[in-house]
């Protein structure tokens, strides 16, 4: 009888933790990061959380700037992973922490390893961006084209490839992809900032000014690759160019 009661208590605890995780994901989808962290932390602190919940908690810590704690959580998630998919999911988030800490080579190597056996839109987005930042444009083009083939509708993948075409001077393809991207009304500032940079380089200052303004209306997080100050400076620059043309 005691064993049966204990069994049901364990099942109830597991289900409760699952509910915390699901509620946390819902709050994250709504942009309520603080509430998402509180809920997912409850699931993780129970000791019975899934690897998905633990790695997601690590990512949220990373996104809110708690690098050391995020790294600790994600390293444990990698170590406790029972399957290759679990391990790769945790590593794909750990790589972002390494990148933000300035270890871009290690982050890039880890994501290359992950993508070889765990292809997801999120991993392609992270790898595509970090490859561009690393400056190996040949590899960056290869992986971003592969990412686009995998998911041609994802805003981050679209932004990466459009930005890369801009960097490599293929303005026609850049324009096509940026227009497709903006139609999706992305919720991250880099999309509008990158398009604004392209428009600025092509002399379309008023449109660039508009895009920089839209970038500033987006939420900025610790993992954002640009700052509000950067965007404001570019917007002020094109504003002065508009006045002189």
Image (tube, rainbow, N blue to C red):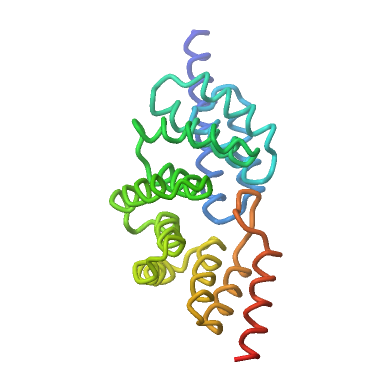
| Whether residue 179 is situated above or below residue 187 in the rendered picture | below
Quarter of the view holding residue 16: top right
Pick the residue in front: 62 or 143. Answer: 143
Q: Is residue 171 left or right of residue 73?
A: left
| Whether residue 10 is situated above or below residue 27 in the rendered picture | above
Q: Can you see residue 170?
A: yes
Quarter of the view holding residue 139: top left
Q: Is residue 100 left or right of residue 95?
A: right
Determine the residue positioned at 37% across, 46% down: 143
Pick the residue in front: 124 or 72. Answer: 124
Quarter containing the C terminus? bottom right
Quarter of the view holding residue 96: top right
Whole-percent x and y of residue 159?
Answer: 44, 60
Whole-percent x and y of residue 219?
Answer: 62, 61
Q: Is residue 173 left or right of residue 12?
A: left
Determine the residue positioned at 54% across, 32% down: 106
Determine the residue positioned at 44% across, 65% down: 166
Q: How many marks?
A: 0
Whole-percent x and y of residue 41?
Answer: 63, 35
Determine the residue positioned at 41% across, 68% down: 178
């Amino acid at each position: 009888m005691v064993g049966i009661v204990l069994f049901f208590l364990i099942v109830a605890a597991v289900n409760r933790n699952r509910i915390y995780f699901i509620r946390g994901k819902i709050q994250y989808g709504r942009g309520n990061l603080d509430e998402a962290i509180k809920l997912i932390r409850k699931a993780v602190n129970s000791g019975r959380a899934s690897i998905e919940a633990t790695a997601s908690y690590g990512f949220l810590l990373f996104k809110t700037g708690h690098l050391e704690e995020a790294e600790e959580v994600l390293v444990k998630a990698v170590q406790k992973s029972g399957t290759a998919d679990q391990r790769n999911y945790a590593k794909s988030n750990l790589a972002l922490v390494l990148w933000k800490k300035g270890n871009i080579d290690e982050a890039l190597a880890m994501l290359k390893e992950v993508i070889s056996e765990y292809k997801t839109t999120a991993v392609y987005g992270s790898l595509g961006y970090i490859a561009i930042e690393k400056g190996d444009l040949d590899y960056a083009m290869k992986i971003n084209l592969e990412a686009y083939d995998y998911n041609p509708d994802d805003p981050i993948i679209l932004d990466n490839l459009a930005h890369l075409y801009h960097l490599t001077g293929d303005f026609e393809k850049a324009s096509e992809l940026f227009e497709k991207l903006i139609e999706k009304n992305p919720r991250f500032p880099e999309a509008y900032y990158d398009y604004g940079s392209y428009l600025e380089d092509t002399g379309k200052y008023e449109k660039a000014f508009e895009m920089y303004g839209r970038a500033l209306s987006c939420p900025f997080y610790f993992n954002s690759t640009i700052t509000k100050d950067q965007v404001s400076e570019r917007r002020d620059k094109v504003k002065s160019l508009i006045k002189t043309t």
